[in-house]
Image: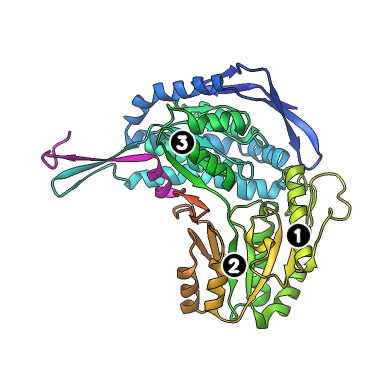
Amino acid sequence: MRTHLKHFINGEWVDSTGSETIDVINPATEEVIGQISNGTIEDLDKAVAAARAAFPAFSRTTKEERIDLLNRIADEYEKRKDDIVEVITEELGAPLSISEKVHYTLGLAHYRQAAKELETFEFTETRGGKVIRKEAIGVSGLITPWNFPTNQASTKIASAFAAGSTVVLKPSELTPFAAIILAEIFQAAGVPKGVFNLVNGNGEVVGNGISSHPDIDFVSFTGSGPVGQKITENAAKHIKKVALELGGKSPMVILDDYDTKKAAKIAVSALVLNSGQVCSAATRTLVPKSKLEEFTEAVKEVLPNFPVGDPQNETNFMGPLVSEKQFNRVQGYIEKGLEEGATLVVGGTGKPDGLDQGYYVKPTVFTNVKNDMVIAQEEIFGPVMSIITYDDLDEAIEIANDTVYGLAGYVVGEDEEKVEKVASSIRAGLITINDAPFDFSASFGGYKQSGIGREWGVFGIEEYLEIKSVVGVRVGVPS
């Protein structure tokens, strides 16, 4: 049992002021693996007060000091690799190989990248007789989701630390133990007291408390659209800045000149990564009408190369969904696809053969999907692919943009001119060409209902800064 009933406030592990606890479930076994404290407003107030008290000194640290801090954090993070991989596999259900190659790696990369960006980042510059300053925004309240426990927390925290802002973090109550390890890493790395604070608990109390707290200057949230709306409403009471990374229904446009089997492999791997629980997942696959049959057969051939099963087995690529609630949600969408008249190619309702225990689902692929169907418009957050056909590139672009979301888009093709046309026409924040790897200096964030603001690299750092103009000073003279 991973029982941890304390919060991390002002550099120490402290008891909660409340007595309620939350069970943490292993989604592969459906068994309780630990408990956390269900934090209270009093706990949150203590954390915010600590962050507020630490802010003046931390915001005045030099760029070089913060580079050194971020690199020390990364060094300590590397020492905890085995612990991070183990805990993510247990609480999220990600296979060991994915916990290591994706979750652990993403989390580490953000601290290294933030340190690298700071080397050339200018916090003060002169423009035409005035001084432009970029100053830390203040106390930042971070609310992170369960699907990428280290990635989503780390990209926000690394950016905040790089900017000189202090932090109060509320991780998801479904996957809290990765964040607890992060707190231990920060403590070992010598993060000053009060600069990082962790309050566990549910969204109704701690999450709402963060977004409406008068002494929190900035809220960064990753999660669902409805919760993002609520956070915005709460923050509006104090006119505080909000950054939102919300849902997606990302298109993958496959051009007619690309090898079909390779395209199918790219599409399937993007679909089943993290059991499909990825906000930027390419769940709408757009293929030329003339290639539909060939592509469909290739998908059926490729899918067995991504086995589903026990996450403790490193040969499995896909584990269970995170919870019973998420399992039922995905089952409902698969049923809806069948009701709407889409053609089931592979998968379907129920659990995969031999996996009766755990929240496992079958990777599911539909063809004959119309873009106005529910399964093509709503975020499913599971391994369900909708294959949609198009006649020409203009129609493909129109279909790709026919969504309320705009988080990501994917283009698979050889002809550079056609690839560029599609990539520049999709209204989304991140476009990936073919099977390009992660670029941690790129921006991540969405258009439309996929959110406000950007994360990763220098773009993430800038979210935690305010801009001040100083006029009437002699250029080149410190002020």
* Residue holding disc 3: 235
Segment tinted magenta in the rendering: 456-479
Identify the disc placed on residue 336: 1
Q: Using the image as rendered, state which of residue 293 and residue 475 is in the foreground.
A: 293
Foreground label between 2 and 3: 3
- Colour logic: rainbow
* Residue 457 position within the rendered picture, expressed as x and y whole percent measured from the top left: 43, 49
User: Residue 182's x, y, as percent?
Assistant: 56, 33
The tag earlier along the polypeptide, 2 or 1, is: 2
Q: CA distance from mark 2 to mark 1?
A: 22 Å
Q: Which residue is mark 2?
A: 252
Q: Is residue 265 above or below residue 73?
A: below
- Type of amino acid at the residue the image marks with label 3: Ala
Q: Position of residue 166 (x, y in %)?
A: 43, 30
* Residue type, label 1: Lys
Mark 3 residue element: helix
Disc 2 residue type (three-letter): Met
User: What is the quadrant of residue 255 in the picture?
Assistant: bottom right
Task: Please name the residue shown 73% across and 74% down the image.
Answer: 296
